[in-house]
Image (spheres, grey):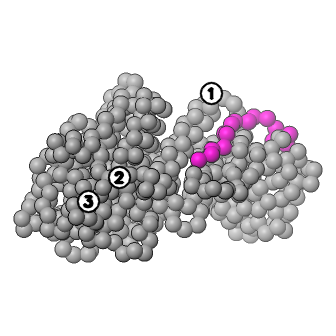
Amino acid sequence: MTAPKLALSDSAVTESTANAIVVGTVQQADGFELAPGSEAIDSQFDGTLTEVLAALGATGKAEEVVKLPTLGRLRADVVLAVGLGKEITPEQVRRASGAAARALTNVKRAHTLLSTLDLQAAIEGTALGAYTFTRYKSENGTAPVARVDFAAENSKENKATLKAATAIAEAVAVTRDFINTPPNDLFPASFAARAVELAEAAGVTVEVLDDKALRKGGYGGILGVGTGSSRLPRLVRLSYKGPKAAKKVALVGKGITFDTGGISIKPAASMEEMTSDMSGAAAVIASVILAAKLKYPLEIIATVPLAENMPSGTSYRPGDVLTMYGGKTVEVLNTDAEGRLILADAIVRAGEDNPDYLIETATLTGAQVVALGKRTAGVMGSDDFRDRVAGIAQRVGEGGWPMPLPEELRSELDSRVADLANVTGQRWGGMLAAGVFLREFVADGLQWAHIDIAGPAYNSGSAWGYTTRGGTGVPVRTIAAVLADIAENG
């Protein structure tokens, strides 16, 4: 990934030598108006900028991009007007900034006025919208904008905002890079090795358990899923302790580096998207590294199970009974419900650290997409913390929604031969049943949240806002904001 250089600029935008100036437009009932902060640019067009943009088709609609040559009225070559929709909110600024960044390919330097509306949102949206993944392209004719100046006072507070927003965007980019790496290059051992590199560079303690250590430790869920592949499973543990850490937070993320469904094999259509089934693991690893960079005053321990779910002569089968880490037994009714098996081991291990909170995330169920669509994560767990996490997810633009864990679903997981089964016997409420299954492995009294990102983790359609095609990096920004909230409020 090639990232643009991001900088603050308190110089007059009319004197900017950038190639493009970015302004916002706001949709109105009878047209549109320029967003606040654009007055100096409008004056260079003798107050006619709105009329000229309207003649070019501008309406102010969210994420609409209209380019206007300056014809010598500014030192810059182009004014790029991007729509904010009907209301200026942090998320609309973020999306507009992303849309602008995507439109600024092969531009050396841009100067944006969207930062006058919300500096952090403008920085995050710009950095994420400019994201590209070209590692496997022999030729690439486009490059992201090389530099973006944000109109803002060069103050201590704004410098801190630039640092934090850039670090958050970098964490999302790391997650996207992991997800977009093909499974022949990203498998349990290589994933673990990359996690070690990132952790050591950030001063984070890291431990990797290979298949022998997993067997010795009794991690039956991870081994059951992972030993069908020639590329054997791993468990990665990352530990960070910040200054004056008052709270301890456990993070767990699902790391299925490729999911065929195992013996209960998936249909061939769109199976290539299962390269994203490790999105939760990628998000959790990147979040720990981010916490270390920003020196969150927390103790954070991530437990990340990594496996590849393949059909072979050594695969686990429907009908097998697995003894999970901690001793509970699970009857396997469907080998394509594998994520909850590796997560169960990791959740029990995470609970042994006696955290105050547990945040776990996974591309867990197709039922999440059926219930909430491709952009809204389902959040389950203990009621208060679930609602807290979902509210923060909505605030940062990742759109989590609180979901229940109905008690009647627990009996649907009863097994004839084991403590419980890995799926229910009916199709309804699959996302919720998976959450109920995971709850069986959460330590008593622990505040926990499970974030199902089966849809939001991967964008198989066209780019929109600051979301490019492929891995999205959801829910890194949610996790970061929850950690910041815990650090501030306990």
Outermost residue toward the top in this view: 244
Residue at (68% x, 36% y) in the render: 7
Q: Secondary structure at mark 1?
A: helix
Of tags 2 and 1, the one toward the viewer is 2
The x and y percentages for residue 152 are: 70, 37
Q: Earlier in the sequence, mark 2 or mark 1?
A: 1
The x and y percentages for residue 438 are: 23, 55
- Calculate the distance from the C-alpha at mark 3 to the C-alpha at mark 1: 54 Å
Q: Is residue 463 magenta?
A: no
> Which picture quadrant has residue 68?
bottom right
Residue to which mark 2 is pinned: 255
- Calculate the distance from the C-alpha at mark 2 to the C-alpha at mark 1: 39 Å
**Residue 172 appears anywhere in the view:** no
Q: Nearer the viewer, residue 33 or 371?
A: 371
Q: Earlier in the sequence, mark 3 or mark 2?
A: 3
Q: Earlier in the sequence, mark 3 or mark 1?
A: 1
Residue 429 against residue 301 in the figure, above or below = below
Residue to which mark 1 is pinned: 156
Q: Nearer the viewer, residue 336 or 260?
A: 260
Residue to which mark 3 is pinned: 228
Which region of the structure is painted magenta? 1-15
**Residue 418 appears anywhere in the view:** yes
Label 2: few (<14), some (14–19) or many (≥20) C-alpha neighbours in 10 Å: many
The x and y percentages for residue 35 are: 72, 53
Q: Secondary structure at mark 2?
A: strand
Of tags 3 and 2, the one toward the viewer is 3
Q: Amino acid at mark 3?
A: Gly
Residue at (76% x, 62% y) in the render: 66
Q: Amino acid at mark 2?
A: Gly
Q: Amino acid at mark 1?
A: Lys
Q: Is residue 423 left or right of residue 171?
A: left
Residue at (85% x, 63% y) in the render: 51
